[in-house]
């Protein structure tokens, strides 16, 4: 494999043709990508080295966005979170805009993983910014802050209070965001509108759809991370029992995969299909245009069309980690498996556990819930001014896109805010093709610089549009 290396930031002919504004936004993102803000997996306090990295990240944001931080009142939340209050002309109906500072880790041997450029060099090349966090979630963080910096430098005053919630450990269950929500509650803040990461302006999103799809999360699935364990006496591998702990556990895992959760098509998914149907060729247009009338058959067919569509219509269970004997000739005294479930909107933690217990049907298998959160409430869409504010902002920045609601299948810090906010949406105003979406949490994460500039346009349109003013 030939590994391309470049200093960060670098430039090429593609970036030479960009506007000064687009170049500036790209350089801001490159600068922040070079600060490896990886939050530790456990809930322990940050080490001195980790604290220094997040401190440098906050200091760099202050340098890049002086008008934002001069206008704002800062509060540190949790281990590394930042809550910034921008007072507006009114404190009624406040807005919360969110993005997280932390990123997922990268293997020490990142080249072997397939990275084209070093993941924390923030290389600018081929009209893109390359590196960990460019899509998740520093790209969204930068376009949000750049839009606010522009507006404030022009003398703009927010018509209503704006709160910026910049989590520090979203990738590790979001303790910083939880602390920020508690602080908002203490101050009596009741968010009227919340926007966090989630959907994107996705190309190659649906078969036959030639236009990009601006998918805005109106809800998100719940989560259960559970540990399945089986105890045994152990002993020497030369005299194995008829049933071993790993064998019992293996049968339980097979039962889970062979007995998936029931399917159903939620109202938000029906709305998504009906809204996108006019832009699809026949027969897809005919079928999806009638999604509300054929939701039962449609829900049963979708799992046969791929993992993404299957996840839209049911709770999912993924086996992620396995543990057994510590040696090749020793019987396991305990076998463990980690199960990550994403709970469909309309279901619950209790229903998910009941299904698992029913299909396993073995008292020797213990299920321990390590983390659990219910699906988020569904935010208003078609008939609500806040939804139309988002639709209008997409139209101003990506006029070629079709805007639809959807249920977000991953988790975000927004789930912690949703319990105090009646309208919580999940959308990053960045263009992503299928390859880019697959690179999130993987090698070669990258964002187009032209998309970053469009993201700034999105936030400007959102903040200055009539719906939120």
Image (cartoon, grey):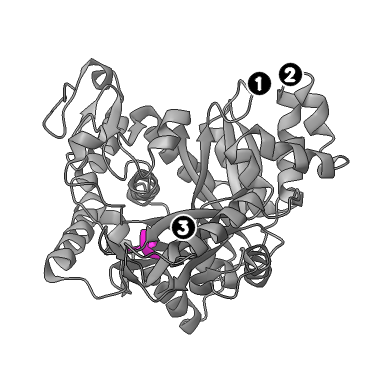
Q: Within the image, what quadrant is residue 338 found in?
A: bottom left
Q: Which dot, 3 or 1, sits closer to the camera?
A: 1
Q: How many angstroms separate mark 2 from mark 1 (CA)? A: 6 Å
Is label 3 in a helix, a strand or a loop? strand
Decide: few, some or many residues near mark 2? Use Cα within 10 Å; few <14, some 14-19, many ≥20.
Answer: few
Where does the magenta region start and end? Answer: 167-174
Q: Residue 293 at what x, y percent from top left? A: 88, 41
Q: Are marks 2 and 1 in contact (CB under 8 Å)?
A: yes
Question: Of callouts 3 and 2, which one flags the residue occurring earlier in the amino acid sequence?
Answer: 3
Mark 1 = which residue?
A: 208
* In the depicted structure, whether residue 426 falls above or below residue 127: below
Marked residue nearer the N-terminal end (3 or 1): 3
Left or right of 359, for residue 193: left
State yes or no: residue 102 in magenta: no
Q: Is residue 8 visible?
A: yes
Report x, y in % for residue 109: 17, 41
Q: Farthest residue toward the top?
A: 13
| Residue annotated with mark 2 | 281
Question: Which residue corresponds to mark 3?
Answer: 97
Circles 3 and 2 in contact, beta carbons < 8 Å = no
């Amino acid at each position: 494999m030939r590994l391309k290396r470049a200093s960060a930031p670098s430039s090429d002919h593609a970036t030479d043709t960009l506007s000064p504004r687009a170049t500036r936004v790209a350089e801001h993102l490159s600068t922040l990508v070079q600060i490896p803000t990886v939050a530790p997996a456990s809930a322990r306090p940050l080490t001195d080295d980790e604290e220094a990295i997040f401190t440098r990240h906050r200091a760099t944001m202050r340098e890049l966005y002086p008008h934002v931080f001069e206008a704002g009142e800062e509060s540190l939340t949790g281990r590394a979170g930042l809550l910034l209050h921008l007072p507006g002309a009114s404190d009624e109906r406040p807005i919360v805009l969110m993005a997280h500072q932390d990123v997922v880790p990268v293997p020490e041997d990142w080249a072997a993983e397939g990275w084209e450029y070093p993941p924390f060099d923030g290389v600018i090349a081929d009209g893109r910014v390359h590196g960990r966090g460019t899509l998740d979630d520093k790209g969204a963080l930068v376009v949000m802050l750049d839009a606010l910096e522009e507006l404030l430098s022009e003398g703009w005053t927010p018509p209503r209070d704006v709160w910026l919630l910049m989590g520090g450990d979203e990738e590790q269950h979001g303790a910083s965001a939880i602390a920020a929500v508690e602080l908002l509650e203490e101050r009596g803040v009741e968010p009227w509108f919340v926007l966090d990461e989630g959907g994107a302006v996705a190309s190659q999103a649906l078969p036959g759809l030639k236009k990009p799809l601006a998918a805005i999360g109106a809800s998100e699935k719940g989560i259960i991370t559970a540990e399945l364990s089986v105890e045994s006496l152990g002993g020497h591998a030369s005299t194995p029992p008829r049933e071993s702990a790993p064998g019992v556990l293996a049968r339980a895992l097979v039962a889970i995969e062979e007995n998936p959760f029931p399917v159903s098509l939620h109202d938000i998914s029906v709305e998504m299909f009906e809204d996108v149907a006019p832009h699809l060729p026949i027969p897809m247009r005919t079928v999806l245009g009638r999604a509300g009338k054929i939701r039962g058959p449609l829900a049963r067919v979708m799992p046969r069309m791929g993992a993404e569509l299957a996840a839209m219509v049911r709770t999912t269970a993924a086996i992620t980690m396995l543990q057994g004997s510590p040696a090749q000739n020793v019987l396991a005294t305990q076998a463990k498996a980690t199960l990550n479930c994403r709970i469909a909107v309309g279901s619950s933690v209790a229903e998910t556990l009941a299904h698992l217990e029913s299909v396993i049907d073995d008292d020797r298998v213990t299920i321990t819930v390590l983390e659990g959160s219910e699906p988020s409430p569904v935010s208003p869409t078609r008939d609500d001014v806040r939804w139309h504010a988002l639709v209008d902002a997409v139209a101003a920045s990506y006029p070629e896109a079709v805007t639809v609601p959807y249920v977000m299948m991953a988790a975000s810090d927004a789930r912690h805010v949703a319990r105090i906010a009646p309208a919580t949406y999940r959308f990053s105003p960045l263009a992503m093709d299928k390859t880019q979406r697959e690179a999130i949490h993987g090698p070669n994460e990258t964002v187009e610089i032209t998309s970053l500039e469009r993201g700034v346009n999105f936030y400007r349109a959102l903040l200055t549009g009539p719906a939120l003013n």
